[in-house]
Image (cartoon, helix red, strand yellow):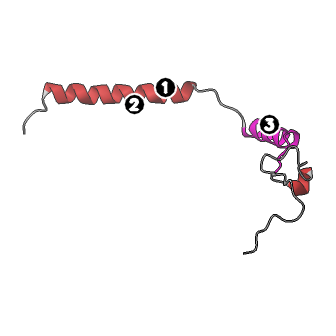
């Protein structure tokens, strides 16, 4: 059996130290309880108007709708050729 080279051993040690550092970062990351996070999410969804849910929030006024295109002429704007 041949012994691993010093360079390989140093690389393994470096990778292990990097992994330990990532684990330490994960451990020190601030956490939130699920009950607090879900309560915060519920409050946000109740307070923030979502125009894609007209059944909940009502329709969007034409002046608030970014996709509304006013037409100058009367009619549907169709062209029949």
Kindly identify which numbered label has been placed on residue 24: 1
Q: Which residue is mark 2?
A: 19
Ranked by sequence position, the earlier of labels 2 and 3 is 2
Residue stretch in magenta: 34-51
Mark 1 closeness class: few <14, some 14–19, many ≥20 residues within 10 Å: few
Q: Report the label total.
A: 3
48 left or right of 24 in image:
right
Query: In the picture shown, does residue 21 fall above or below 52?
Result: above
Chief secondary structure of the magenta portion:
helix
Determine the secondary structure under disc 2.
helix
Instruction: Judge by depth and name the residue closer to the eye, 65 or 29.
Output: 65
CA–CA distance between discs 2 and 3? 33 Å
Residue at 84 percent of width and 52 percent of height: 70
| Residue in the image at 72% along x and 35% along y | 33
Res. 14 image quadrant: top left
Q: Residues within 10 Å of mark 3 (few under 14, many from 20)?
A: few
Q: Quadrant of residue 16?
A: top left
- Label 1 with label 2: CB-CB less than 8 Å: no
Query: Residue 77, image x and y in percent?
Result: 81, 64
Helix, strand or loop at disc 1? helix
Q: State which mark lies toward you, 2 or 3.
A: 3
| Residue 13 at x, y percent in the picture | 28, 26
Q: Which residue is mark 3?
A: 40
Across and down, in percent, residue 51 comes to 83, 49
How many residues crowd around disc 2 within 10 Å: few (fewer than 14), some, or many (20 or more)? few
Furthest residue to the left? 1
Q: Are marks 1 and 3 in contact (CB under 8 Å)?
A: no
Q: In terms of depth relative to the viewer, which is nearer, 58 or 65? A: 65
In the rendered structure, find residue 52 and report the number of the disc placed on it: none
């Amino acid at each position: 059996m041949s012994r691993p080279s010093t360079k390989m051993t140093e690389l393994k040690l470096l990778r292990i130290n990097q992994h330990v550092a990532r684990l330490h970062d994960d451990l020190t990351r601030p956490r939130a309880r699920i009950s607090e996070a879900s309560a915060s999410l519920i409050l946000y969804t109740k307070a923030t108007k979502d125009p894609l849910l007209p059944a909940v929030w009502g329709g969007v006024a034409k002046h608030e709708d970014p996709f509304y295109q006013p037409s100058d002429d009367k009619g549907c704007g169709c062209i029949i050729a």
